[in-house]
Image (cartoon, rainbow, N blue to C red):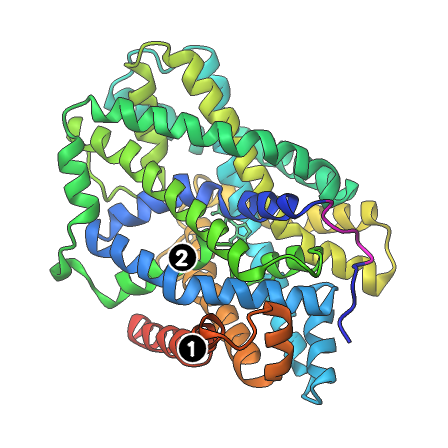
């Protein structure tokens, strides 16, 4: 019953899938979002819960998403409908796909704005703005950028055009090549930054902050945010990994690939933390200063480092690429759906989706300046979309994926797709997906939201 190829194309090699999925996972979530949320919730305990969530909830759900995608071979909406029908279950399961589309729109709208900051910082790096900059100077550069709606709009527009461009050409085409070069280089530069941070003298303090859990700081909201960060960072819960799985050849190992992708993603996040926090402490800065953290810290690092202009330019360029390969995966599910259901060409579908996200993004960038007094639940649009997607919509999507894969989909199908021969690994996965993941998400949810 399994279809062997997707109408939207296939990854040319097995490595291409790992690269693309890692490209989706590794992005602003690791380098921008992880450090600032870890800082907001006090470090160690948050990091520990985050890693636990990756291992016990994230990896099993990633396997489930790839499995469902590969079985259905269509956009998440149509995949869910088809798989539910084959099991004789209600087609309403396709709502999971619809929720994913909404979530993807909301995420990309603020993701693109933050990617715009990264582009602006590339230019500032190259022109030497960060040379010998101090904390006050770095604060001022960030404030000037986010206060300027027109600049933000220009960068946001450029970034969305870049995303539409790649998506219109088809995922396998441009993406594979970009990621193959990008991932190793970004990784090397991060290691270099960590080594530099090591020399600042506050490394031990930072390592202690990140790895010694202080459970007295652990509120229910912190646990919810750590779980949300795991979903966000692994690109889970909205169908991005599902659609990438639908382009994966039938022989590839789902479990093995998931371990590699999740492992690299967590490694990059931890490295980013180790690069940022020593500088935070060495300069007497506050870890809990919110979404500007990395943008206020990195200029100081680069500004005082030999060869800083070169390294910082390279770093921000790579970060733009990392954001780009993630953003594409947010657009792909809706583009595939537009092609399948409305018969649009890929180009038209990509433009239509891109323009819609672009409009929503304008609300996000205005929330940083002109509309700073427009708040819902005490948050502007950017922070609201970030909170709502990572902490509510993604875990909810993940919960439904787990229930569907563990309870609705017949056992034979998952045995076949995961190719684990009913062995110990399969049974472990099944326990995690049927009991551990749904219960954990539900409990954290209820506790965190009350
Ligand atoms: N994981 C990406 C990051 O960390 C962001 C991302 C891409 C994402 N696709 C996603 C998040 C799908 C949630 C769902 O930067």
In this view, 4 is above or below 32: below
Q: Compare residues 59 and 99 and report the one nearer the observer.
A: 59
Residue 309 position by quadrant: top left
Q: Position of residue 276 (x, y in %)?
A: 29, 33
Alpha-carbon distance for marks 2 and 1? 15 Å
- Asked if disc 2 is less than 8 Å from ligand 1, the answer is no
Q: Quadrant of the N terminus?
A: bottom right
* Residue drawn at 19 percent across, 61 percent down: 218
Of residue 232 and residue 263, the one placed in the foreground of this image is 263
Residue occupying image coordinates x 78% and y 63%: 4
**Residue 302, image x, y percentages:** 34, 18
Is residue 443 visible from the viewing direction of this image?
yes
**Residue 86 locus on image (x, y percent):** 74, 83
**Along the line of sight, the residue nearer the viewer: 128 or 240:** 240
On the question of residue 358 being in view, the answer is no
Residue sitting at x 44%, y 74%:
424
First in residue order: circle 2 vs circle 1: 2
Q: Residues within 10 Å of mark 1 (few under 14, many from 20)?
A: many
Q: Magenta residues, as a range?
A: 7-12
Q: Is residue 218 left or right of residue 303?
A: left
- To which residue does mark 1 refer? 438
Location of residue 311 with respect to 77 vertically, above or below: above
Q: State the image quarter where residue 421 is shown.
A: bottom right
Q: Given contact means CB atoms under 8 Å apart, are the residues at marks 2 and 1 in contact?
A: no
Q: Toward which corner of the image does residue 124 lie, by quadrant?
A: top left
| Magenta stretch: helix, strand or loop mostly | loop
Q: Secondary structure at mark 2?
A: helix
Position of the C terminus by quadrant = bottom left
Question: Furthest residue to the bottom?
Answer: 88
51 vs 339, nearest the viewer: 51
**Mark 2 nearby-residue class (10 Å; few <14, some 14–19, many ≥20):** many
């Amino acid at each position: 019953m399994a279809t062997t190829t997707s109408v939207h194309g296939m990854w040319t090699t097995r490595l291409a899938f790992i690269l693309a999925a890692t490209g989706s996972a590794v992005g602003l979530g690791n380098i921008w979002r992880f450090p600032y949320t870890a800082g907001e919730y006090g470090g160690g305990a948050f990091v520990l819960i985050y890693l636990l969530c990756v291992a016990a909830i994230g990896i099993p759900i990633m396997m489930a998403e790839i499995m469902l995608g590969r079985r259905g071979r269509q956009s998440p909406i149509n995949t869910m409908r088809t798989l539910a029908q084959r099991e004789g279950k209600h087609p309403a399961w396709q709502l999971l796909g619809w929720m994913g589309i909404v979530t993807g729109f909301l995420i990309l709208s603020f993701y693109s704005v933050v990617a715009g900051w990264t582009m602006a910082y590339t230019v500032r790096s190259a022109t030497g703005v960060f040379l010998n900059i101090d904390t006050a100077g770095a604060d001022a550069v960030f404030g000037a950028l986010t206060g300027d709606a027109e600049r933000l709009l220009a960068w946001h527009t450029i970034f969305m055009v870049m995303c539409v461009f790649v998506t219109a050409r088809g995922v396998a085409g441009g993406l594979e090549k970009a990621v193959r070069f990008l991932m190793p280089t970004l990784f090397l530069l991060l290691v270099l930054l960590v080594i530099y941070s090591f020399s600042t003298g506050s490394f031990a303090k930072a390592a202690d902050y990140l790895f010694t859990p202080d459970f007295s700081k652990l509120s229910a909201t912190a646990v919810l945010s750590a779980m949300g960060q795991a979903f966000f960072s692994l690109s889970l819960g909205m169908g991005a990994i599902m659609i990438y799985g639908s382009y994966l050849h039938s022989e590839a190992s789902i479990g093995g690939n998931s371990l590699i992708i999740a492992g690299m993603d967590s490694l990059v996040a931890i490295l980013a933390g180790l690069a940022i926090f020593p500088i935070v402490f060495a300069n007497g800065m506050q870890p809990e200063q919110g979404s500007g953290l990395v943008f206020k810290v990195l200029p100081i690092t680069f500004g005082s480092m030999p060869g800083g202009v070169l390294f910082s330019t390279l770093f921000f360029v790579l970060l733009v690429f990392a954001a780009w390969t993630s953003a594409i995966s947010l657009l792909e599910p809706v583009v595939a759906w537009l092609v399948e259901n409305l018969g649009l060409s890929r180009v038209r579908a990509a433009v239509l989706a891109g323009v819609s996200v672009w409009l929503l993004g304008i609300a996000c960038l205005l929330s940083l300046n002109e509309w700073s007094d427009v708040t819902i639940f005490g948050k502007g649009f950017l922070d609201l979309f970030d909170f709502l997607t990572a902490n509510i919509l993604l875990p909810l999507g993940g919960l439904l994926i787990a229930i569907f894969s563990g309870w609705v989909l017949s056992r034979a199908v998952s045995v076949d797709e995961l190719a684990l021969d009913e062995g110990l690994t399969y049974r472990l996965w099944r326990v995690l997906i049927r009991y551990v993941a749904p219960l954990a998400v539900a409990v954290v949810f209820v506790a965190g939201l009350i």
